[in-house]
Image (cartoon, rainbow, N blue to C red):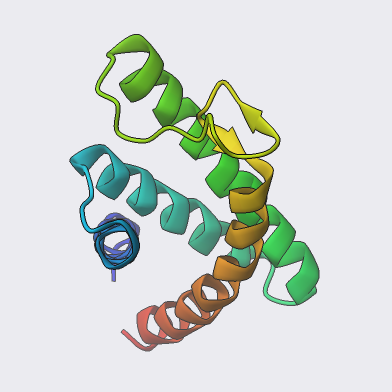
Amino acid sequence: MPRTIENLVIFLFGGAIYSLIEVLFRGFTHWSMTVTGGLCLLIMFRHFTAKPHEPLFMKCLFGAVTITVLEFIAGCIVNLWLGWGVWDYSGMMFNLFGQICLPFSVLWFFITIPAVMLSEFFGRRFSEM
């Protein structure tokens, strides 16, 4: 399968999953979070498939940092610059400009575990094609 198609599949799947998680826990989502979720899974997928033997702890750390950085960038654009008010972590401990916070970064660490499993699943499927 061409790499462009793989990237599109992973991006769309990541966006759908991230949006579903938000709808389940917040009751709504925003299209910018769909894009952010797609980018997160795509970056993690490429990293995890390039380093399949990397320890799970390191993969989770990579995932947490990736999601946190992309969430910060998206937040600075959609919340601070455009003023859309998609989310606000100002009331959370250890937040940075209300866009990211330590408790969610820790959550992203653990949410990376299913992302690792998805990456392995898709990696096997793509290699069979």
Residue at point 29%, 44% (across, down): 35
In this image, 110 relative to 7: left or right? right
Residue 61, percent from left and from top: 73, 57
Residue 124, percent from left and from top: 45, 86
Viewer-closest of 107 and 94: 94
In this image, 66 relative to 38: left or right? right
Residue at point 69%, 64% (across, down): 60
Residue at point 37%, 89% (across, down): 128
Q: Answer above or below: position of 95 versus 80.
A: below
Q: Residue furthest front?
A: 91
Image quarter hosting the N terminus: bottom left
Residue 110, percent from left and from top: 63, 69
Residue at point 80%, 74% (across, down): 55
Residue 25 in which image quadrant: bottom left
In this image, 29 relative to 120: left or right? left
Viewer-closest of 6 and 76: 76
Q: Answer above or below: position of 35 versus 28.
A: above
Observer able to see residue 69: yes
